[in-house]
Amino acid sequence: MSLNKDKKALEDELSRLRNEVKELMQKSEKPEVVQMDSELSALVKYMTEERERTNRMLTSIMDRIGKMEQRITSVPIEVQGSMQEQPRAEFPLGRMDLTIVEMAQAKGMICADDVKDLFQYRGRNGASARLNNLRRMGLLKRHQIGHRAYYSLDADKATKIQIISPPQ
């Protein structure tokens, strides 16, 4: 009798396993499962390709950084005493511009109102234009204080500049 019970239990187990196999086969035939698998594989493929592109980009960036470092290290470092004095830049200035530079040197800081009063301009536009031109030339430095712009002689550049004034 125990043999029949064992046989019956084995047959039940076998039948249950067959049903599970059939269900699995039916599930694998469903397009949803296949579609999910293909979407997952497509996602994995995309991620792999993206990682390869990122690695190529990083390699390119690292190569560029390496080249920059080589250029930086190949430039000889000059000792202060061995630097040759650079020739002075020459700026031909008109009388009015020369007067503005001299006033900036004497007063320390000037604004458009100072230039307007000095040359008796009606407004500040002409004075501001002259100051801005001198700043673009590198002779003056601009300082914004509140709503006003003040200009001072650029001491660093003034030593490297030779101002040529017209004959008087």
Image: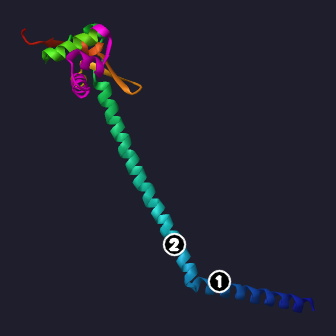
Q: Tell me the element at label 2.
A: helix
In the image, 92 versus 94, the foreground residue is 94
Question: The N terminus is located in which quarter?
Answer: bottom right
**Coordinates of residue 40 in the picture (x, y in percent):** 53, 70
Q: CA distance from mark 1 to mark 2?
A: 20 Å
Question: Which label number is shown at residue 24?
Answer: 1
**Relative side of 19 to 86, left or right:** right
Q: Which is the main secondary structure of the residues drawn in magenta?
A: helix
In the image, residue 41 sits, relative to residue 48, either above or below, namely below
Provide the residue designation for mark 2.
39
Q: Is residue 124 highlighted in magenta? A: yes
| Residue drawn 31% across the image and 35% down it | 67
Q: Work out whether mark 1 precedes mark 2 in sequence or the reverse, and give the earlier one.
A: 1
Q: Amino acid at mark 1?
A: Leu
Point 13% across, 14% down: residue: 95
Q: Nearer the viewer, residue 128 or 166?
A: 128
Which residue shows up at 67% across the image and 86% down it?
23
Answer whether residue 141 is magenta in the image: no
Residue 150 placement (x, y as % from top left) = 33, 20
How many tags in the picture? Answer: 2
Q: Are marks 1 and 2 in contact (CB under 8 Å)?
A: no
Find residue 111 and name its label.
Answer: none
State which region is magenta: 106-134
**Residue 159 appears in the picture as rendered:** no
